[in-house]
Amino acid sequence: MIEIVIATKNRGKISEIMEIISVEKVRLVDLHQLSFSGTIEERGKTFKENALVKAEAVYERYGIPAIADDSGLCVAYLDGKPGVRSARFAGPDASDEENNRLLMKKLQGVPWSERGAWFMCSAVFYYGPATYYVTEGRVNGIITEKCEGEGGFGYDPFFYLPSLRKTMAQLEKAEKNRISHRALAFRALRKHIEEYVADIATR
Ligand code: IMP
């Protein structure tokens, strides 16, 4: 069995990633199982930089291949903000509610045609010194004026998907996991992990 660490402590993400990246001959472990303590600072300017920092730090600490991601919401009218600062949009320890309130304030009076937005996710598989794969996933939508739906987290209740006529928060969990930015990025990453595993097996 080849061990790969999921470089996050977020239990929601762990189960989502486990579902997508179940590859034969791979045993996925998470940071709770490794009793990882401390935090990894996300100071990068891009999702890719942040995902890379997380995966690299965990690889360096344990010497085991690591996968990590970073994601957020980008709003066209706000020149791509909040972007990498999505979790901290309204302040360092902001709640989802506070972030959404600020988003509504900044988009007050902005017409529907200018409320385009996208969720982005960068995923990284880091498997040797400075050796890694990066994949990205993006899903487009429109920021609503009122929240709708109870599911998901973060900006989901305000993120409307025109093709499904629902907000992200109105989707069933399985449906979100099929179409989300994270699902797209990790599905693409899975292919690289399979190649890596096949390569090791032939050595
Ligand atoms: P991170 O990838 O855990 O750093 O996520 C950063 C932030 O982006 C989260 O705290 C949310 O505010 C936002 N975000 C990322 N993915 C989603 C999503 O699927 N739905 C809603 N908000 C998200």
Image: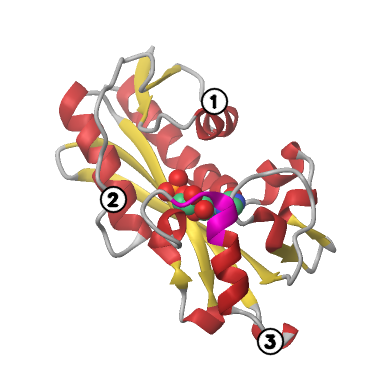
Is residue 122 visible to us here? no
Is 141 positioned to the left or the right of 9 in the image? right
Position in image of residue 140 (x %, y %): 64, 68
- The majority secondary structure of the magenta stretch comes to helix
Indicate the amino acid at tag 3.
Gly
Indicate the amino acid at tag 1.
Ser
Position in image of residue 172 (x %, y %): 79, 41
**How many angstroms separate mark 1 from mark 2 (CA)?**
27 Å
At horizontal 25% and vertical 46% (from top left) the residue drawn is: 41
* Closer mark to the observer between disc 2 and disc 3: 3
Q: In the rendered image, which residue does mark 2 sit on?
A: 42
Q: Is residue 113 above or below residue 167?
A: below
* Mark toward the start of the polypeptide (1 vs 2): 1
Position in image of residue 141 (x %, y %): 68, 68
Q: In the rendered image, which residue does mark 3 sit on?
A: 109
* Magenta stretch in the rendered image: 94-99
Is residue 38 visible to us here? yes
> Looking at mark 3, is its residue's CB closer than 8 Å to ligand 1?
no
Is 60 positioned to the left or the right of 157 in the image? left
Cβ–Cβ below 8 Å for labels 1 and 3?
no
At horizontal 41% and vertical 35% (from top left) the residue drawn is: 193
Closest to the observer, 160 or 48? 160
Closest to the observer, 43 or 96? 96
Q: In the rendered image, which residue does mark 1 sit on?
A: 22
Image quadrant containing the C terminus:
top left
Helix, strand or loop at label 3? It is loop
* Closer mark to the observer between disc 1 and disc 3: 3
